[in-house]
Amino acid sequence: MFGASLVGTQLQKGRYKITAKLDKGGIGETYLAEDTSKIKEKQCVVKRLLPQQEPPVNEQEEHQRWVQRQKWVQQKFEQEAEMLESLGKHDQIPALLAYFQEDREFFVIQEFVQGNNLRKDIYPGGQWNEHAVTYLLRDILEVLEFIHQKGVIHRDIKPENLMLRQSDKKIVVIDFGAVKEVTSQVINTQGQVVINSVIGTPGYMPVEQLRGQPLFCSDIYAVGMIAIEALTGVFPLQLATDPNTSEVVWRNRVQVSNNLANVLEKMVRFQHQQRYQSASEALQAVHNLLQTIPVSRPPYQQPPPPLKPADFGRRLVAYLIDISILALGSLPISAVMFGGTATLWGLIFWYAVLGFLYCPVMESSPMQATLGKMAVGIIVIDLSGNKITFEQAIKRHSSKLLSYLLVFIGFLMGGFTQKRRTLHDRISGCLVIRKQ
């Protein structure tokens, strides 16, 4: 197992079935898994930690180092896992479900958060109004206050590590840097740390964190940079710095009130002594700002427009366009393969082959639709409103065979069910809707 992809494998004697890879970094990987011991809420997140070590000098030293490192990492890993377990009691931090060592590797099992991260809402060119940014600051700092009160520095706060939970639109803080530290440190044969890698993301890390000395106010800096990014629509690394003071220059890019600007400037001061020293202190300043603005909700908490299921007529037109495209594509291939004359069975064979390439690829792509669906303005989504995976698209296309075998009854369901879902939509967990 060591070093190989875990997709398709099982952990803890088959309890955790790895279904997909979510992310990979230099010191670990994150997978989506199913907990087969549960009846409900089976999905969970598996974090696989990849320990680092010094290059060995000889076989004896390599073994000695491995033994020393395993002892150190085991102890450190258990300490950090206990920390995660304590933090996971907060409603807006994923619960720790289990942690263990298997085949010389370390694993953390956490609650799966259904939703999207804030990178979907904070992007280059997109600018939030200052009221929305103020509420965002409050929502992040309320969770960060709890984290800091537990004596923990997150170390990697960024839009990608702030999940918007689908069920209640609350911010959930994920991916703590403390566990990453266990595998980013390199130790020698005496069990001493000889290399201490920096944990964090450029643009959201202040200078003391870059030097390997993170503080509580380092997290405050990261939150401030997220707010500035939301206001300006500019990625932090693209913002200029004052050559004399090293302060971030951003106020020339957006019009905001002095009250909010002053709070943000204090959050992102170059000298850490000049920042808010805790999340509680920064949160109090934000609460003071909220007293002066009308009650509103950030854009990420606005209710989405209602989904409009695609009517049967549109789906029928899209279907006819797509089968025409596939038939026209199959005709020349069949003719070439069968000596210049297209045969019925040749057409059917190549129609099926092209269909398996065309439909799943197009529907799981950023377009979310085949050419026929694009022509009539409809797309395919999952039940959460997100783009379907390639595996879902394959399942959706394959299950159309059932509808054919049932004399098209599976297709006709799309004209009578409330959400216009056909049999293959139901089997694959999909919806076909009008494009917003």
Image: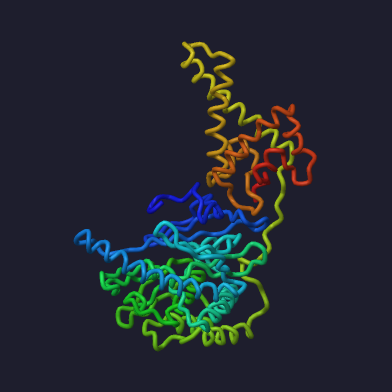
Q: Position of residue 393 (x, y in %)?
A: 58, 41
* Image quadrant where residue 189 sits: bottom left
Give coordinates of residue 359: x percent, y percent. Answer: 57, 36
Between residues 434 and 339, which one lies in front from this camera angle? Answer: 339
Against 320, residue 360 (above or below) is: below
Would residue 230 be found to the left or right of residue 429 on screen?
left
Judge whether 14 appears above or below 413 on screen.
below
In the image, 244 versus 171, the foreground residue is: 171
Does residue 343 show up? yes
Q: Is residue 262 left or right of residue 187?
A: right
- Which residue occupies 66% across, 74% down? 296
| Quadrant in the rendering for residue 217 | bottom left
Relative to residue 320, is residue 173 drawn left or right? left
Q: Residue 119 in the image: x percent, y percent? A: 51, 62
Look at the image and name its color scheme. rainbow
Place residue 325 in its image quadrant.
Answer: top right
Q: Is residue 222 above or below residue 17?
A: below
Q: Residue at x 58, y 63 (%)?
A: 111
Residue at image coords 65%, 71%? 297
Q: Is residue 263 above or below residue 81?
A: below
